[in-house]
Image: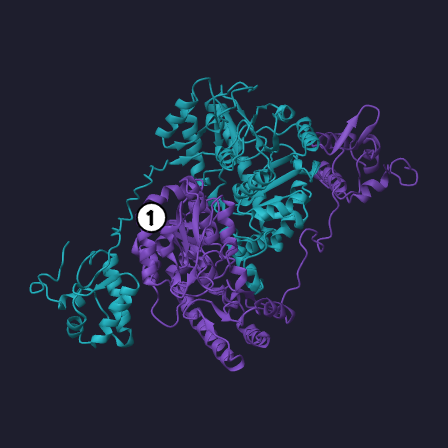
Chain colours: A cyan, B purple
């Protein structure tokens, strides 16, 4: 233990006040002294056990009343910074001695080198976010909002947003949506989390999932204590006709418009099979309509929800149509499920910002949302066409599928090459995902579709300026 | 089953197209026809089983090519809206027939009559939200942000926000805060939820709580499967010295600066006792510093966290200093806990908006946050003084406590009167909470503080214009 006051001749008490940069102006004296002492302890300039000068000597040194120093010491003792004991004076209290870490060196998470280009699926073109229009919507929303709009809202979410979302979904996606059965959530992930909670409360033990999908969604369900038996995927989409053979399944999670990642639209027979299963068993269909707005080659495939709004939960999100960093999504619920989701939400809105809900409501109501969707649809379609053309020219043996809609395509690869292509891409500074990354762990058993080596190419991900480079890098790594 | 086409002489097919408001302009013909048909089914104008006119007759009626109608029918069959069977023609498919509910009549949640005044604690003055400065911060943040700021961030939250929060907490609350051990969350509720998850993963079974507090926090912990043994509260704050007697407790949830709702500051001995317990048992202290910024009569009580940053988790929030509808808070974590909370968050930021994080970072960095806190501190202090003065004059027998800090006061009542006073207030249009509302269910056993009839008066809650009326209503209901 070091005690700077032990050799106080060499290091006189007068250095103390100087060293602490005390600002001794007016009534702030005691405050300033306390702040300086706290800071000195926090930064480690005064370590555990250090004995402080007596209040008398420090007061003399600083030219202030002794009581000022004594009071400051007493308050710091009360706050636990200092200890005062008969005979041993006032000392820095025992406490952990945190070092202020260099901010550049996060210890727990090593930084990875960022790739030059990314074609990893799941992100829209972030550079296309309409900042000006968004800010204009925020200004209108914040100017018009009543004061109590800034409080915590009810569990369904702001009614302004639910109303325009209901209109939009009916118009654009054919969804049967009543504002009173819409619940706003912080994106699909949050919605699925609430759903998993409500299913558990219903004593559901298993949710069937597609044999290809996002592992983060599967993980969320298993973390909630649910089993996730897989349904295989073929050229007509997910084998919902197999649902009847699964035991104890209370719900099924589907991407009917554009299966993620294979890109197949769910065949009408399979839609009927899913709804028939739900009606026969009392099960629920969870429809993840993540990119339903982006369809290129034919009319939009309607949402599955319209086939039976009392058995299908529809999930939509602004993460793909706008940007991922905006955590806002919506669930359209069977009427009987509304109170259960409200309960899972904790009977209040603890997650989604009222300000941002009001801004999105204004953004949709003004037509800016649909203009943005149209503009992005053109942009993504052009990129898809360029992808198909570039591959036809530079990798003519390679098939591209799942391109009728969405923001990604499946680029098939010769058997056994997927992993080496992904690694070669990484070496070239191109981040891209192999199909294996999306495969359900247990998907092998009963998998009717032979495993296909492929890349899942998110052509929406790059900015316009990075797109040509990303496409070129992709063509160069293909066999 | 009704079939409008059965009596097609009285209701000729030509009415069909008219009724559907088809816009037959150019290439949008098939689209328009499909949209109109979907809409008609959705709204119930065409019900299950309705037979549609043949494609030939509808085409003739509309003056379009027969193929256009046939293709539209075929696609709607594919989407599941219609069925086509040999011999029975094209009909509306079987589906649930949702009625479009009148939006004014939410069936599941009866609307309560709003009280005229509210003194329910827990909300800041929403009318004081600095809209203009917030918008200015949003404009600067959105203008300056790189594109990838609009993507989903890492699990810790935006580094811009973590950096300014670390500075602010060190300065204003004496917290030892390194940006790398700060995790941004959607307010205290979300933070506590993550913490409960991390504790469960550590196999913790019980979290001690204060015998008075918010039931929503207790409910959150029990929902996560944790037991919540209570610690009683006396005039020195929560009896942390009782922690050693509780078995199997892995953490304790405290409000040390200003106990909610009793308003006592945790005594230094009790602070030491809590830290000693945590060190001896490896337990964690969860410090809910919900209103630490608002202290009136003495120097700020430092955060407990500084006593041992490796054993105390510090929770702060913008819900009280700004508005509740802004779902942003922060946790300052022991270093070893960071990866566990990151895991609980799902290794990504799924909840908090990047845009709003950037805006708050800019708002803090510009000094607007501290200006707002100072301005609200003056306003709340003035109201507290008015409350105390009004009660001294109009209800002189009544004691007010917990007033050294915060946004609420405890107004003591004669024994046995609390419930009738709360009910009388409701009749007068004043919403106010009784102390009983915050009492732990199991708090009676071992409760050393006699139960006190009291009101918990949130004097921050009304707007300036409603404050005088609220105060007057309060004085009128007091015995």
Quadrant in the picture for residue A430: top left
Between B346 and B392, the one nearer to me in the picture: B392
Between B85 and B431, the one nearer to me in the picture: B431
Q: How many marks?
A: 1
Quadrant in the picture for residue A427: top left
Q: In the image as oriented, which residue stretches furthest toward the right?
A: B9
Element type at mark 1: loop
Q: Does residue B65 show up?
A: yes
A451 w.r.t. A319: above or below: above
Q: Could you tell me residue A242's position as x and y percent?
A: 63, 24
Q: Is B205 situated left or right of A268 in this image?
A: left
A91 w.r.t. B206: above or below: below
Q: Residues within 10 Å of mark 1 (few under 14, many from 20)?
A: some
Quarter of the image with the N terminus of chain B is top right
Between B260 and B302, the one nearer to me in the picture: B260
Q: Could you tell me residue B145's position as x and y percent?
A: 41, 51
Chain letter of the residue carrying label 1: B
Q: Could you tell me residue B37's position as x and y percent?
A: 75, 39
Picture residue at 92% right of the left edge, 41% below the top: B10
Give the residue pinned by disc 1. B334
Q: Is B256 situated left or right of A293 in this image?
A: left
Q: Could you tell me residue B412's position as x and y percent?
A: 50, 71
Q: Is A309 situated left or right of B178 in this image?
A: right
Between B171 and B369, the one nearer to me in the picture: B171
Quarter of the image with the C terminus of chain B is bottom right
Q: In the image as oriented, which residue stretches furthest toward the left?
A: A9
Q: Does residue B156 show up?
A: no
């Amino acid at each position: 233990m070091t005690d700077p006051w032990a050799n106080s001749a060499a290091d006189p008490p007068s250095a103390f006040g100087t060293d602490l940069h005390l600002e001794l102006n007016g009534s702030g004296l005691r405050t300033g002294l306390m702040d300086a002492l706290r800071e000195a302890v926090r930064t480690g300039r005064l370590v555990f056990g250090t004995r402080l000068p007596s209040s008398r000597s420090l007061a003399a040194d600083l030219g202030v009343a002794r009581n000022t120093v004594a009071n400051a010491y007493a308050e710091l003792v009360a706050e636990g910074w200092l200890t005062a004991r008969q005979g041993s004076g006032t000392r820095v209290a025992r406490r952990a001695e945190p070092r202020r870490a260099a901010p550049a060196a996060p210890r727990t998470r090593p930084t990875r080198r960022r790739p030059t280009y990314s074609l990893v699926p799941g992100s829209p073109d972030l550079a296309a976010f309409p900042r000006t229009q968004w800010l204009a919507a925020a200004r209108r929303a914040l100017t018009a909002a009543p004061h109590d709009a800034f409080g915590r809202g009810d569990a369904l979410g702001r009614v302004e947003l639910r109303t325009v979302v209901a209109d939009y979904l009916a118009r654009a996606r054919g969804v049967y949506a009543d504002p009173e059965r819409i619940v706003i959530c912080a994106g699909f992930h949050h919605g699925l989390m609430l759903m998993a909670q409500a299913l558990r409360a219903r004593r559901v033990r298993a949710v069937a999932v597609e044999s290809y999908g996002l592992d983060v969604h599967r993980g969320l369900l298993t973390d909630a204590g649910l089993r996730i038996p897989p349904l295989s995927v073929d050229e007509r989409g997910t084998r919902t006709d197999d649902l009847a053979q699964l035991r104890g399944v209370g719900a099924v999670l589907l991407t009917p418009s554009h299966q993620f990642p294979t890109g197949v639209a769910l065949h009408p027979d399979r839609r009927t099979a899913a709804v028939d299963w739900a009606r026969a068993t009392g099960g629920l269909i969870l429809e993840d309509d993540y990119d339903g707005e982006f369809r290129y080659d034919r009319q939009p495939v309607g949402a599955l929800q319209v086939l039976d709004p009392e058995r299908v939960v529809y999930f939509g999100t602004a993460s793909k149509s706008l940007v991922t960093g905006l955590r806002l999504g919506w669930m359209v619920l069977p009427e009987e499920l509304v109170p259960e989701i409200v309960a899972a939400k904790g009977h209040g809105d603890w997650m989604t910002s009222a300000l941002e809900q009001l801004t999105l409501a204004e953004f949709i109501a003004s037509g800016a949302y649909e203009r943005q969707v149209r503009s992005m649809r053109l942009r993504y379609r052009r990129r898809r066409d360029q992808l198909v053309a570039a591959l036809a020219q530079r990798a003519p043996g390679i098939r591209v599928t799942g391109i009728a809609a969405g923001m990604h395509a499946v680029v098939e690869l010769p058997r056994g090459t997927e992993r080496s292509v992904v690694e070669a891409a990484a070496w070239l500074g191109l981040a891209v995902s192999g199909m294996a990354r999306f495969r359900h762990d247990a998907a092998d058993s009963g998998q009717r579709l032979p495993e296909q080596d492929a890349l899942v190419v998110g052509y929406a991900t790059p900015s316009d300026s990075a797109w040509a480079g990303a496409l070129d890098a992709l063509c160069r790594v293909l066999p």
